Amino acid sequence: MAVLVTGGAGYIGSHMVLALRDAGEQVIVLDDLSTGSRELVPEDVTFFKGDVADETLVCNIIKEHGVNAVAHFAARIVVPDSIADPLGYYRANTTKTAALVAATIAGGVRHFIFSSTAAVYGEPAVVPVPEDLPQAPINPYGRSKLMSELMLADAAAAHELSYVVLRYFNVAGADPMGRAGQSTPNATHLIKAACQTSLGLRPYLEVFGTDYPTPDGSCLRDYIQVSDLVDAHMAALSHLRSGGRSLTLNCGYGRGYSVLEVIDAVKRISGCDFEVRYSGRRAGDPAVIVARADRIRKEFGWKPRHDALDTMVSQALAWESRQSSPVGTWAEGRRLQREKLAEVA
């Protein structure tokens, strides 16, 4: 029996593919490559380039490969983009998820893992944020994911489907073995952007807002390392296969770091004092979002293995260096990028 991973050529999805493959599972990847990279999918993993909303394609994949579980990562995830293009986000994140769930049910698949987000909480009245806090998203991205959660719950109640919704906080880092990392072009993830700036891949790093009600005025976020997050998905798969009930769980560590603290960590670990520019607040950004993360530990016995900020930054730096330098070292990558910038200048 196989696991279908949608968005398996993307950042988190590719790490899930590696974890499943390492566990001896048969893995099928479906990705339209709009933001993913085909190179992140191992050659021995079956890959389909296509749309998750193509119900005929999904049903054929399920039938031909004996799929018994779906892990759904494919989505659009950039908050400012969702404000500029709300209908595009509802189409990509809600309408297409509905089509995928319909094909999943039609194909007789009974287990579904859904990649959701802390953005469903909006500006939370309680921090750390518990799963049962009323959801009040403040941007179309969060609303599109919440709509998908509600739709999935309704579909599961009407059909023989069990699911786990995992609400991610801020995902960071890379595979400790260097096999995968954040490869999305022009990604907005803070740690990736700061690491790229330290390598000379970006001329400066922009900080949006320094007047938030936080200790240093910048936004505060709960960062979770990507392999730890994937461990939570593997635990969710085991839970569902053993007959476990449907669940909605936070994925975070229960502590936060500010934007400025993250930048300081990248500068210290990289040894590069890069330029930082300060701008006004960005629409749709909550001031503080930190998970209450005890429920996932209780339900799954989940224990983080890479939960230090320095670890996440070091992994991201190593990944960015390998992407930018054929030599594969951070120092060499930085030297080569400086030479390229000098040539352009």
Image (tube, rainbow, N blue to C red):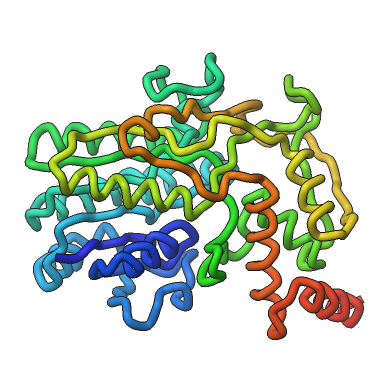
Residue 6 location, x and y as percent? 32, 60
The residue shown at (51%, 49%) is 305
Give the answer, above or below, for where 284 lies relative to 111: above
Give the answer, above or below, for where 54 lies relative to 288: below
Q: Quick check: can you spot residue 253?
A: yes
Q: Quick check: can you spot residue 141?
A: no
Q: Image quadrant for the N terminus? A: bottom left
The residue shown at (65%, 74%) is 323
Left or right position of 124 against 92: right
Residue 136 location, x and y as percent? 45, 22
Q: Where, by quadrant of the figure, is residue 144 drawn?
A: top left
Left or right position of 219 against 237: right
Left or right position of 139 against 135: right
The residue shown at (40%, 78%) is 42
Residue 20 location, x and y as percent? 32, 63
Q: How many marks?
A: 0
Q: Where, by quadrant of the figure, is residue 262 drawn?
A: top right
Residue closer to the observer: 194 or 272: 272
Residue 68 location, x and y as percent? 15, 58
Q: Image quadrant for the C terminus? A: bottom right
The residue shown at (37%, 54%) is 73
Give the answer, above or below, for where 219 lies relative to 67: above
Q: Where, by quadrant of the figure, is residue 278 drawn?
A: top right
Left or right position of 2 against 20: left
